[in-house]
Image: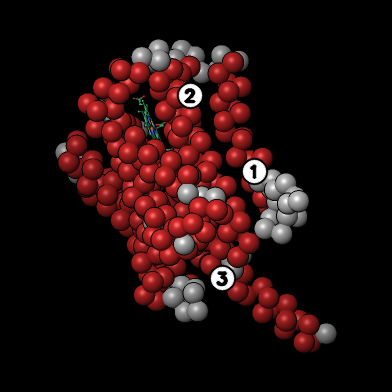
């Protein structure tokens, strides 16, 4: 008889602390939203506020799942792969909650929800992204991987790049005024896709050299700053030079380009430490 496998077990059926921590953490944001809802902290429009909170976590989880491949290569932490599927499935669960909350906010008037999805382009885009996540979640089991074959499964799962792009567009379109986090997400999307392209051409034994990781961080930050300046120039006729100059001051808070630069450089520093520390330890052992 086959032993029961739980989400926190690894492939050999043993408890994986990493999987257990991630599994529990994935319930965190949803539990916080439920608690806030019942304690009245989401007033005056609790459903709308809950839609926002769960929507934010849906896109964050999609991005965290997309970051697993670069992180495990740069930080040489191959075990990180064991949590990718769990995070991807959680992103789908959050997307379903987000859609359900929207339906609840529309008093469960399914005809109205359907017509809004057809008529409002940002909802159509969000809905296509949910359908894409559903396809990925449905084919995420070991049995489905075996049935499809590794190559076809991998090809199908590349639609996650399109889903993430649709999620960023949906986020930007609904945000109207406060584009701080959507702009960061767009910059991180540039980094995540850029990493995959560069790794395809320049990887050495599966790893992108750290100089390229650093260069990508800088390029993503520049693209984020230019994207933000272009948006304000087109939408509000703002002087692009002045928008770019805000990146050098903290008057308007930490700008998205600076956040993207910080994350890109932090990942590069993590990769450098991961390479240097074992070398230093070996050297010290040699002297001892
Ligand atoms: C994977 C798919 C989706 C993702 C990643 C996503 C993500 C988001 C995010 C990040 C926000 C903004 C949160 C904030 O600004 O605080 C948002 C808002 C919203 N989303 Fe989605 N969403 C998705 C699909 C959908 C679908 C299918 C619907 C409904 C049909 C929907 C309806 C809404 C609504 C109504 C808002 C709030 C708009 C407002 O208050 O003006 N989303 N979503």
Q: Quadrant of residue 119?
A: top left
Label 3 element class: helix
Q: Please identify the quadrant where the C terminus is shown.
A: bottom right
Label 2 beta carbon less than 8 Å to ligand 1:
no
Residue 269 appears in view: no
Where residue 279 is drawn, which disc sits there?
none
Q: Residue at x 48, y 17 (%)?
A: 46
Residue 111 appears in view: yes
Label 1 element class: helix
Q: What colour scheme was applied to this rendering of the protein?
A: secondary structure
Q: Position of residue 240 (x, y in %)?
A: 22, 47
**First reached walking from the N terminus: tag 1 or tag 2:** 1
Q: CA distance from mark 3 to mark 2?
A: 40 Å
> Which sits in the foreground, 36 or 250?
36
Residue furthest to the bottom in view is 286
Q: Residue at x 36, y 46 (%)?
A: 163
Return the residue at label 3: 272
Q: Residue at x 68, y 75 (%)?
A: 278
Camera-side mark, 3 or 2: 2
Q: Quadrant of residue 234?
A: top left
Q: CA distance from mark 1 to mark 2?
A: 21 Å
Quick one: label 3, few (<14), some, or many (20+) residues within 10 Å? Answer: some
Where residue 23 is drawn, which disc sits there?
1
Q: Position of residue 179 (x, y in %)?
A: 34, 37
């Amino acid at each position: 008889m086959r032993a029961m496998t739980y989400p926190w077990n690894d492939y050999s059926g043993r408890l994986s602390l990493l999987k257990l921590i991630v599994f529990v953490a994935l319930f965190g944001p949803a539990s916080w939203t439920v608690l806030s809802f019942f304690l009245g902290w989401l007033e005056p429009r609790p459903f709308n506020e809950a839609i926002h909170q769960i929507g934010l976590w849906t896109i964050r989880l999609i991005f965290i799942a997309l970051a697993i491949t670069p992180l495990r290569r740069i930080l040489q932490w191959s075990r990180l792969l064991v949590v990718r599927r769990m995070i991807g499935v959680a992103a789908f669960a959050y997307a379903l909650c987000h859609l359900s909350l929207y339906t609840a906010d529309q008093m469960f008037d399914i005809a109205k929800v359907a017509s809004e999805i057809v008529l409002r382009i940002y909802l159509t885009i969000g809905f296509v992204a949910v359908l894409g996540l559903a396809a990925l979640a449905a084919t995420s089991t070991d049995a489905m991987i075996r049935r499809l074959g590794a190559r076809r499964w991998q090809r199908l799962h590349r639609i996650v790049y399109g889903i993430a792009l649709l999620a960023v567009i949906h986020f930007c379109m609904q945000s109207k005024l406060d584009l701080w986090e959507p702009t960061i997400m767009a910059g991180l999307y540039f980094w995540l896709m850029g990493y995959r392209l560069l790794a395809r051409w320049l990887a050495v034994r599966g790893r992108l050299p750290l100089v390229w990781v650093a260069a990508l961080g800088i390029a993503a930050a520049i693209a984020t700053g230019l994207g933000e300046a272009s948006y304000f120039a087109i939408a509000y006729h703002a002087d692009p030079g002045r928008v770019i100059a805000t990146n050098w001051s903290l008057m308007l808070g930490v700008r998205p380009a600076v956040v993207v630069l910080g994350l890109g450089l932090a990942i590069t520093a993590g990769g450098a430490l991961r390479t240097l520390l074992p070398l230093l330890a070996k050297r010290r052992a040699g002297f001892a």
